[in-house]
Image (cartoon, rainbow, N blue to C red):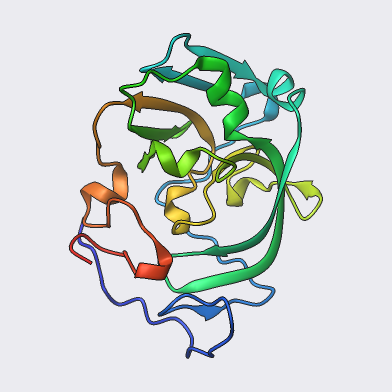
Amino acid sequence: MNVTRGFTGRPRVDRPGLPPGQYDAGDDWPVLSAEVTPDLTPADWTFRVDGLVAEERTWDWWQARALPESVYEGDIHCVTSWSKFGVRFGGVSLDVFLDAVRPDAAATHAVAYSHTGYTSNLPLADLRGGRAWIAFDHDGAPLSAEHGGPARLLVPHLYFWKSTKWIAGLRLLDHDEPGFWEQNGYHARGNPWQEQRYSGD
């Protein structure tokens, strides 16, 4: 697969809080996926955390929804140049899941994987400290399948390809292991404010 640098989007309109090279998508939420949207119901959904942890754990839908709720209100940014302001996601802070499995001191990175097989790599530090969620709702409604429902990873301070749709689990590692887009030329971390779109940026 070739990586294109042809992300031009709409003409940029400067506004506070807009990272470089981005445009304000307004009410639009473009649908971009590397895979076909799966037919995944809450009854079929599970979330597992394994790898370098003291206790590997798997939660089903009802166990995950019974955990303390947390809300993210803020902005999201896609590598294809759109940003959305003032979004609201409801779910569970990833800290709750990670605290339950007790990551090993050697764990530095995670591979997030979906129920479809998609993967993305993330430094563990980007998933801790109230910076990431398992999201079930968007603007008070269940997360639609095309946007990753019934549940997706949400890491809003990084480009949105890191926020794995149809999240199935996290595997904690002591090294960085590139995911799907990272193997195809995208940046290992993906910080919008530093325009880390591609390897070498």
**Image quadrant where one finds the C terminus:** bottom left
Residue 196 position, x and y percent, is 31, 64
From what the image shows, is residue 180 above or below residue 1?
above
**Image x and y of residue 120, in percent:** 36, 42
At a point 66% along the width and 30% down the height, the residue shown is 41
Q: Is residue 161 above or below residue 23?
A: above
* Residue 125 shown left or right of residue 146 in the figure: left
Report the number of numbered marks: 0
Of 107 and 75, the residue lying toward us: 107
Q: Residue at x 73, y 24 (%)?
A: 67
In front here: 79 or 176? Answer: 176
- Judge whether residue 39 can be spotted in this image: yes
Decide if residue 46 is on the left or right side of residue 109: right
Residue farthest top in this picture: 55
Residue at 31%, 65% in the rendered image: 197
Residue 182: x %, y % from top left: 26, 49
